[in-house]
Image (cartoon, helix red, strand yellow):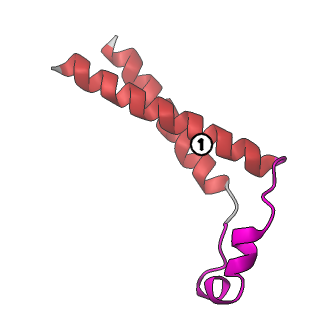
Amino acid sequence: MNTALMILLAIASIILIVSVLLQSSKSDGLSGSIAGGAEQLFGKKKSRGIDAVLEKVTSIAAICFIVISIILVAISK
């Protein structure tokens, strides 16, 4: 049981890392915060496409990572 959960934790962490790295940047750095901050704040967010899919995958992988980590801590005590 412990080994299976460790394998699932490793898979969830790899998926989480890859999905975060594949997401496009939401800011333009310092120049974007000065010049285009209002555009980002009030601009439309893409509801479809790869960005939306990656956001959902990131959320699910993060939740799985946290839940599996808590279960492993509870089992080890």
Residue at 75% x, 51% y is: 51
| Above or below, 62 relative to 51 | above
Point 44% across, 33% down: residue: 65
- State the extent of the magenta-drawn residues as a range: 26-49
Locate the C terminus by quadrant. Answer: top left
Quadrant housing the N terminus:
top left
* Quarter of the rendering containing residue 22: bottom right
* Quarter where residue 28 is shown: bottom right
- Dividing the picture into quarters, in which one does residue 2 lie? top left
Amino acid type assigned to the residue bearing label 1 in the image: Thr
Q: Nearer the viewer, residue 25 or 9?
A: 25
**Where is residue 31 drawn, in percent x and y?**
64, 89
- 38 and 25: which one is in front? 38
- Residue 32 position (above or below residue 2): below
8 displayed left or right of 73: right
Left or right: residue 75 versus residue 10 is: left
Residue 10 in view, yes or no? no
Tag 1: Cα neighbours inside 10 Å, few (<14), some, or many (≥20)? many
Where 43 falls versus 73 (above or below)?
below
- Where residue 75 sits in the image (x, y, percent)? 24, 17
Q: Residue at (70%, 61%) from the top-left corner?
A: 24
- Residue wearing tag 1: 58
**Rendered position, 46 above or below 40:** above
